[in-house]
Image (tube, helix red, strand yellow):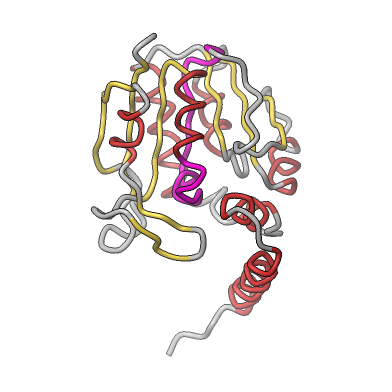
Amino acid sequence: MASLDPNSLQRRARRAVSYFWGRLRGGPESSRASDYWGGLADYHLSNDDDPVAKARSQWLAEEVVPRLSLMSLWEIGTNSGRNLEVIRSVHPGIRLKGTDVNARAIDFAKGKGLDIEFELADANEWTEPEYGWDAVLTMSVLDHIPDDATEALAANISKTSSHVITVELWDGAAGSRGVYKYSRDNKALFERHGYATLQWELAPGQYDIEQSQLWVYVGRAAWA
C-alpha cells in the first residue's frame, strides 16, 4: 500500500478548518468562497511547475492568443501567474494583468520579476472600466465561484472585454462537485451575456477525463 503524503494530509486539514470557519461566519456564498480561496496558504504552489498545467499555458500562448490577435489580456484568478508568465515569454509586447483573492499567490507572482501587473482583488467587487481589454481569461476560477455571483461576473466581463477565454470544469451537468467546486456550462453562461461562441470543446491538458473534465470556451462580444 502506498504511504500517505503527510504534507497532503496537512493541506487537507488546513482547508477543512478554513471551510468550517467560513461556514460559521455566514454571509453570501460568494463572500465565503472568496474568503476560503483567499485564505489558503499553499494555494499558489499547487501546480506552478506541473507539466500538464504548463502545457495548457503553452497552448494558450501559442494558439489562442495569436488566433484572436490579442494585444491585452487580463487573467482573473491568476494564482501563481503561470499562465501569464508563459504568455509573456511568447508575446513580449502584449499588455498583461493578473488578479487574485489570495495575497500569498499575488506576492509569489510578483516575486518572479515579470513585466506583468499583478494585483490583489476580488472579482466580486468590480472596478474595471468598460471596453478596457481584448480578452479576459479564467482557468479553474469560475468553477470555484458559486451561482449567486457567476451571472454578475459574466455580465461585468461582457462590458469590459471583447473576448472571453475560460478553461473550467464541465462534466455534462450543472451542480456542486465539492468544496466551492462547481460544474457549469460556460457556453450557455456567456451566450446569455452577449458573446458569440468561437470555441467550446475539451481543453488540452486534462487531469481526470472521467471525473473532472476541463472545457475551453472562447467567445467574442457583440460590440467587438
Residue situated in front as seen by the camera: 127 or 164? 127
Quadrant of res 151: top left
Indicate whether residue 140 is drawn in magenta.
yes
Q: Position of residue 37 (x, y in %)?
A: 62, 54
Q: Is residue 162 above or below residue 202?
A: above
Q: Position of residue 107 (x, y in %)?
A: 76, 42
Quadrant of res 110: top right
Q: Position of residue 194 (x, y in %)?
A: 34, 21
Q: Residue at the location (57% across, 40% down)?
A: 77
Q: Position of residue 201 (x, y in %)?
A: 24, 39
Q: Residue furthest top?
A: 223
Residue situated in front as seen by the camera: 146 or 137? 146
Q: Residue at the location (44% across, 27% down)?
A: 61
Q: Is residue 103 above or below residue 153?
A: below
Q: Residue at the location (40% across, 12% down)?
A: 69
Q: Residue at the location (34% across, 58% down)?
A: 212
State how many labels appear: 0
Quadrant of res 89: top right
Horizontal relation, residue 29 to residue 220: left or right: right
Q: Is residue 38 above or below residue 150?
A: below
For the record, the magenta segment spans 131-150
Residue situated in front as seen by the camera: 50 or 103? 103
**In the rendered image, which quarter contains the N terminus?**
bottom left
Q: Residue furthest bottom?
A: 1
Horizontal relation, residue 45 to residue 133: left or right: right
Indicate whether residue 18 is drawn in magenta.
no
